Image (tube, rainbow, N blue to C red):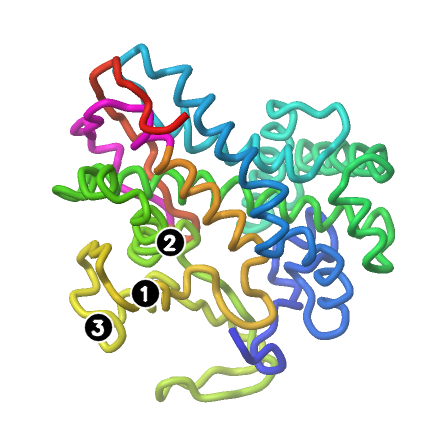
Amino acid sequence: MRDAETFTVDHPGFSTQQVIGPSMLSLDGAAHRLHRDPFATPFRLQAIRSDVTPWIEQRALELIARVEPAGSADLRRALARPLAVDTMAYVLGLDGIGAEEVVGWYEAIVQSVDSVTVGSGVTREGAEAFAELSHAVLASLDTSPLLLAVQSGGDLTPDEIASNVAVLLFGGIVTGDGTNSLVIQHLLGNDGLLRRVMDAPALMPGVVDESLRLEPAAAAVDRFATRSVTIGGQEVTRGDLVRVSLTAANRDPDIFSEPDVFDVDRANRAKHLTFARGAHACLGIHLARAEAISVVGAVVGRLHRPALMSDQSMSPVGLVFRSPERVPVVWEPTKTPMHD
């Protein structure tokens, strides 16, 4: 992940590029910096803390308040996923575009990428979705704070900006949904953890970090070898696909003791590789953590005695992007909020 000269993303095998064009996801070197650097400032820690986190926290509370009186809900569909979608719609600032339209674009682009991956080509729906997204980006260049920052911080064309917005949209929703869902599972599925967090809310970031370590929502990253090289005694030839398992790295027993155990007291839990490393380390690391911490805060602060309902659909599924299909939770329907 740190050696972009030997292991590159700039390869025809990257199906996403065929759907949305060149972007920070599929370029390396100077071209990668040209595409990524203008987007970096709005996603820095201070910008997320001051400009986005208060909105995310409020939105998480609004979503949980909708289902609180019912006493039960699938919190993936009621909280985890809509928070990821609404957050990306808010951050991107596309003028007059609602969350449902954003979801439609996202799903069509994802299906088109899957189609290219299996050799069936770009779908008509995917092409239309990207065209609509591009039109929305062009219409919002003078109104979106993020897009204004991108334009002032670089030399990207409007089409190049649209391609990178599509990357952010995809990454922000699929990994945000998965991370938010998984952190709810870990919070409620480990004996005594909920009570500890209720008594000590400062544990919330630790719960998120250990959840990210144990079960990354994006389980692997791909690179292509630019030259022949040996990895762990295995010969890799130029052009070969090299898949890095972030999940396996995060459970390396040489780094993490009892790696398959969720341990919020683990001293080195933040050493996980869930956000990757090197030039393509996740741009949205601070946004993702803010979302997940807000999810924990909403569950702890608004729900009285929440507990997971036994359901096989809670097991994470997926090879690259992993999340549970459902996160069914039951609670007592009345509670005095822990926070205003």
Image coordinates for residue 18, horizontal then vertical, percent = 69, 52
Image coordinates for residue 309, horizontal then vertical, percent = 19, 26
Which of the two labelled residues, at mark 1 and mark 2, occupies the earlier sequence position? 2
Q: Please state the extent of the stretch shown in magenta in the rendering.
A: 298-318
> Which is nearer the eye, 237 or 315?
315
Q: Going by the picture, which residue comes out furthest to the left?
A: 191
Q: Report the residue at 84% width, 39% height from top.
A: 141
* Residue that numbered label 3 is attached to: 253
Give the CA separation, mark 2 to mark 3.
17 Å
* Residue that numbered label 1 is attached to: 250
Q: Is residue 76 above or below residue 114?
A: above
Residue type pointed to by label 1: Asn
Residue type pointed to by label 2: Pro
> Which is nearer the eye, 246 or 69?
69
The reply to whether callout 2 and callout 3 are in contact (CB within 8 Å) is no
Residue 204: say if magenta. Answer: no
Image coordinates for residue 250, horizontal then vertical, percent = 32, 65
Q: Report the residue at 25% width, 42% height from top.
A: 197
Residue type pointed to by label 3: Pro
